[in-house]
Amino acid sequence: MGMGDLMVLFRRAEEFSLLDELIEGCGEGNSGLLLIEGAVGCGKSEFLETVATHSEKHGALVLRGMATAEERQHPLGVLRQLTADAPPGALPPLPPAPAAAGRVAAMRQFATAVRGLSATAPVVVCVDDLHHVDELSGRYLLHLARGTRGAKVLLALTESVHEHGDDPLLRTELLRLPHFSRLRLERFTPDAVRATLPDRNEAETERLHRASGGNPLLLRALLQDPGARPGEAYHHAVLACLYRCGPATPALTEAVAVLGPLATTPHTARLAGLTEPAAARALAALEDAGLLVRGRGFCHPAARSAVLDRMEPDARRALHREAALLARAAGAPDTVVAAQLLAARHTTEDWAPAVLRAAADQHAADGALDEATALLALAREACPDEARRAELGVRLAVITGRTDPAGAERHLVEPLSALAAGRLDGRALGPLARVLAAQGRIDESAEVLERLAAWEGRHPGGERRPGDIPGDDPLDGLSAFPQWGAAPRRCAGAPGPHPARAVRAAVHPAALWTLPADAEEGAAQAAELFLRGATLAEGMVEPAVQALRTLLYLDGAERAVPWCESFAGQAAERGATGWQAVFGGLLAEARLRLGDLTGAAETAEDALRAVPARGGGVQLCGLMATLVRARTAMGRPEAAAAVLSRPVPERLTGSVHGLAYLRARGHYALATSRFHAALGDFLDIGRHMKRWGLDRPRVLPWRADVAEALLRLGESRQADRFLADQLTTRDAGDPWVRGMTLRLRASLREPKERQAMLTKAVDDLHRSGDSYELARAMSDFGQVLRLLGEPARAAMVNRRAWHVAKECGAEALCVKILPGHTGDAPQEAAAAAAPHADLVASLSESEKRVALLAVHGHTNREIAQKLYITVSTVEQHLTRVYRKLEIPGRQALPVDFHLGVAEFI
């Protein structure tokens, strides 16, 4: 759609009515004088062209002229254009000398000639941009307007509403003429844009109106750009409008663009080097054109960018520097001042570092992480104090960790290098120790704390510098809940040493990763209570992680999953991809602990995809570990190998995430028959877990892993020693720990004893909720039953184990249970299709308990012993179960039979 078409569609009926009236009146001998006013870009020139074309259609002779600022100093420039449009010889030649041309006689001669032309056809004189017309041409036009009254002559002139030229007499005299008419062209309204673009929805036309400010020139440019989004055409249209707004406009708009929210009239005038009245007039012109919106700045960010992009870099930085000083003097918020400092790359003012840090903290609190990191990076770049620079690096790591865990670790390289070289000031050690511990880097955190203790010994009282951040106790936040093992704090006002020193002897850097040793049920309840009231924010991530780990390892993965999903979802909604990876990692671990191999792998992959792919980091090793273990258990070693081939940090064993990675690598080594390599990784885990005081089999059962590797190496006696040791730990009573331990230990016993141990293992693992480990135990149980001469019972257990393994996604285990079998379910399972839900619902609770135990391969006598009933009662229950489920007997019990309620085994 052309601009002329837009004009026709947008113009109001009264505008065209006036135009038709003037043209018709001109043809009837009534002279006219029309002044078309409007802001820049509002269509004055296009409307003047409409006047010309309409006049020509009515048989008029049209003389066109356009004034420009450049030709203002050239006498008779516009008049020469008009005479050139007339038929040859119809108008007298203009005098060559300005003095002669300026005589009244010459002007009257020209007006008389035009009047003579109108005797044969109406004459319409169109002059664009009257405010730029040269002085002599303006006097001729005034004489023409006076001398053609009563003739078939129409003068149509355009003028910007905020520019009246250098000759105020011309406009004043024109206004006094009785046949004078004025037409004011306004910007387009939202309704007009909607009416003109009926194929666009209301939201789209509203967006177009906002981006253009209703300015027709900008609207046309938007429609020319791809997708009607501000692009090159819009960029050029903005600059064209600014160019035509007057000589003061470039400096003024640059000041407005640089000042942003500070662009008040006094500030803009000062920065642009203008008087306030001049600035106010120019600003009003830009607002009338729709380029500026009062109180909001440019109509669209792309308009501001167009202005900033055309500035020379050095000039732009200098203007930002002046704006920063102005903002500071005006008492503007730190975020506003810091934005100017950043744009200017200016940090030489004494107050600049503190302003940058305060603004960064505010942006971080508001979730504007890119702005926060940019400000901190500038402050660190310009900081000569190594200790303060290290503090800024730590703060950068904390903020970057929200979106990029690996990037956060890179920010700690400089302070850690300074630490290794002995150059790091003791006052930077506390924050560094805290963030390292939060990242799970236990060894490095401990090393920093040792340096801090030595520094405090040399600096009694823990003096602070002006501007130090309060509360930089390195252990703050590492144990948010007293019942979870937090060290007692010194009472407020009580005498005592530096806070960090007071707790250092009681709390290890691994405190964040420690599970409570006592009152486990109460700790899990407290964790869930905390999570109900927790809001995802900086300072709450570590306590939330601690609470989720407590639920996961002390109260079962099933209870932790919804909380992990909730926090991972909150992080995703906020765009905090680093936090999303943290909570997604816990969710993946919880699903793996439930035996949901497919779900764990997908969750871990999603979390890894969410964070920037710029190399691995310590924290991401935990996610990679979960993915490797899941893929290995699924029987996909090539997929696990692909994950293990990704780059990882060198100091793996110094972090809790690194130990998880070692365990995953060990499981892969077991699956690929590299038993010695697996054994080495598992033993490394054990050494570090013990040294850190984190030796909890519920979290990382390294002894069971060591035993499995030893069994593959034929070292049965040593394997049994590690398994026996695991059964003496504080977690020996946990069903998951005990079930895994018993399964492995059963392989070292004679078949009869093995059967008894595997029976207990199956029961424990069923209670633990880990379907994958349950399937492994049931597979071993089926094998021992076959060895003991119970093929029918073994077959039933094996099909149940196969079904559980299939649900987990453990294809390799399915093959082990029923070698050579292919398809969705074993042949026996097909015959034992799940009964209708209402048939299962008809069973009593006692019947359900007996049936489920039978499905898991227990004999009638074993069922009677477990439920403290007689064998006869068991037989009676089973008979009723067969009848209600409409099946012939035990072998037809459905493999996917679930209670869905109380645990009883």
Image: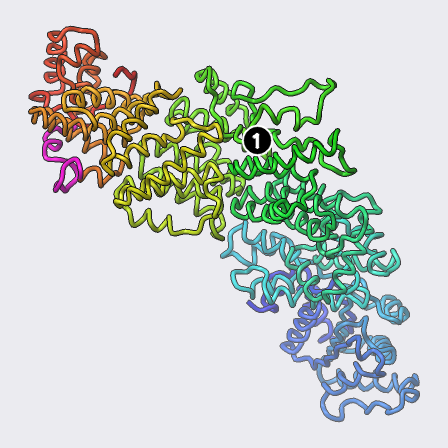
> What residue sits right under mark 1 in the picture?
540
Q: Give the range drawn in magenta.
A: 816-834
- The answer to whether residue 253 shows anywhere in this view is no
Write down the quadrant of residue 425 in the picture: top right
Nearer the observer, 291 or 882: 882
Residue 405: x and y in percent read 52, 44
Residue type at the position of mark 1: Met
Q: In this view, does 569 lie above or below 734?
A: below
Of the 4 image quadrants, the one containing the C terminus is: top left
Judge whether residue 746 is colored magenta: no
Most common secondary structure along the magenta stretch: loop
Q: Is residue 403 above or below residue 529?
A: below
Q: Residue at x 28, y 30 (%)?
A: 719
Residue 491: x and y in percent read 69, 18
Residue 282: x and y in percent read 80, 60
Other residues around mark 1 within 10 Å, as few (<14) / some (14–19) / many (≥20) = some
Residue 184: x and y in percent read 74, 61
Q: Residue at x 58, y 45 (%)?
A: 400
Nearer the observer, 788 or 598: 788
